[in-house]
Image (spheres, rainbow, N blue to C red):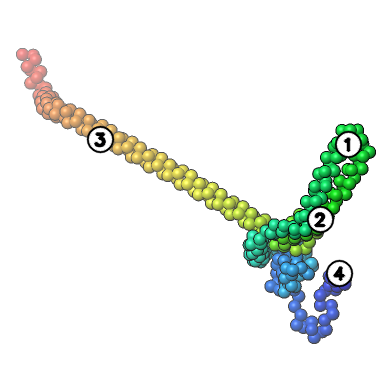
């Protein structure tokens, strides 16, 4: 019936049976609505695991719909909502397991407090006397059987052995009922506790009953809950470890980058200092060359002045002489003829 209803919902919509008045206030449900069970969307709902068991949680207050689950799995926002839904499911499952573990602890304490069965009480005087008589008869008959066997009287020995077996049966019947009762009592007292679901079991029980417990709804349900918690915690630890490794790699990259920047600045500063030294050396060389030229100019300056002065005076005389000669050609000529 539920399958048919789900098929009709898929074909005609969940609001197919609503009246026009009811349709006015009807709201289409989406997988991300608060009314929808996120645990059912992403994994399983614990309310579905223990139906009709001692751990029955009752019906889930939120919507379980296969069509919505399929819509969620096809949604482009699926991966973004999975961590949120899994966290909600893990929180619910952890509470279940905490309550169960408290129950298991109380069960262990209860088993530890149970006293061992008392030793069997001694036989009554009457039974003890009967037991002694039987044991004496059995002893005598066995001696006779041994003698007959040595004498080669096999038939007589076999007949006495049959009497010995009868006496042993009477001896067993005298003590066995009490031993069986004690054995049954010990088996009833010897209980075990299932660590998965907290159920009490009879130790060394029949294989069929043990298998029935292992495949039972309560045991399987708590197994799923515990497995999910372990898987969730392992994934969380793995993600935390990966984040730590990423942070360490980023820190190492930043450290190396800082070292590179420091080395670059050091080289840049060293290069700047070298350029400054080169500039200073060049300036010093320039100053030295300029000073040398100044000193050379100073040394050559005196001799040049004297030379210029002498040249100036001689030149003046020479020029005067030349002018004089040009002005008195006759006199010069007369002097030469006379």
The answer to whether residue 228 is visible is no
- Whether residues under marks 4 and 3 lie with C-beta atoms below 8 angstroms apart, the answer is no
Task: Kindly report the distance in space between the C-alpha atoms of the residues bearing marks 2 and 1.
Answer: 29 Å
* Figure quadrant of residue 315: top left
Q: Quadrant of the C terminus?
A: top left
Measure how far apart labels 2 and 3 are at the Cα level: 135 Å
Q: Tags 1 and 4 in contact by the CB under 8 Å rule? A: no
Q: Secondary structure at mark 4?
A: helix
Q: CA distance from mark 4 to mark 3?
A: 105 Å
Q: Position of residue 317 (x, y in %)?
A: 10, 26
Observer-side mark, 3 or 1, equals 1
State which mark lies toward you, 2 or 1: 1
The residue identified by callout 3 is: 287
Q: Position of residue 274 (x, y in %)?
A: 35, 37
What's the CA distance linking mark 4 and mark 2? 66 Å
As drawn, 234 above or below 20: above
Above-or-below relation of 97 to 244: below
Instruction: Read off the residue under disc 1.
Output: 148
> Which is more N-terminal, label 1 or label 2?
1
Q: Which residue is mark 4?
A: 3
Front-most of 136 and 273? 136
The local secondary structure at tag 2 comes to helix
Pointer 1 local density, CA inside 10 Å: few below 14, some 14–19, many at least 20: some
Residue at position x 85%, y 71% from top?
2
Q: Nearer the viewer, residue 85 or 217?
A: 217
Q: CA distance from mark 1 to mark 4?
A: 85 Å
């Amino acid at each position: 019936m539920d399958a048919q209803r789900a098929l009709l919902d898929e074909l005609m919509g969940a609001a197919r049976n609503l009246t026009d008045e009811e349709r006015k206030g009807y709201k289409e449900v989406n997988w991300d609505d608060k009314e929808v069970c996120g645990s059912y969307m992403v994994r399983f709902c614990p309310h579905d695991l223990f139906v009709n068991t001692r751990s029955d949680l009752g019906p889930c207050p939120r919507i379980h719909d296969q069509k919505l689950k399929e819509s969620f799995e096809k949604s482009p926002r699926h991966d973004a909502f999975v961590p949120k839904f899994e966290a909600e499911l893990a929180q619910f499952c952890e509470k279940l397991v905490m309550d169960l573990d408290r129950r298991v602890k109380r069960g262990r304490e209860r088993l530890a407090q149970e006293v061992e069965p008392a030793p069997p009480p001694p036989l009554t005087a009457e039974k003890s006397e009967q037991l002694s008589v039987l044991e004496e008869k059995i002893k005598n008959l066995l001696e006779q059987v041994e003698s007959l066997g040595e004498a080669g009287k096999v038939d007589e020995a076999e007949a006495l052995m049959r009497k010995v077996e009868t006496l042993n049966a009477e001896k067993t019947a005298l003590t066995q009922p009490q031993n069986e009762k004690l054995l049954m009592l010990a088996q009833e007292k010897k209980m075990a506790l299932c660590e998965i679901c907290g159920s009490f079991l009879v130790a060394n029980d029949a294989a069929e009953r043990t298998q029935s417990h292992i495949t039972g709804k309560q045991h399987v349900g708590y197994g799923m809950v515990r497995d999910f918690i372990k898987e969730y915690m392992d994934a969380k630890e793995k993600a935390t470890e990966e984040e730590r490794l990423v942070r360490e790699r980023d820190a190492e990259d930043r450290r190396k980058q800082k070292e590179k920047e420091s080395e670059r600045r050091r080289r840049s500063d060293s290069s700047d200092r070298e350029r400054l030294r080169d500039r200073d050396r060049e300036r010093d060389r320039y100053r030295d060359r300029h000073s040398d030229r100044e000193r050379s100019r100073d040394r050559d300056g005196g001799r040049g002045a004297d030379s210029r002065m002498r040249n100036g005076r001689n030149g003046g005389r020479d020029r005067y002489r030349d002018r004089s000669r040009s002005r008195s050609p006759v006199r010069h000529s007369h002097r030469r003829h006379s």
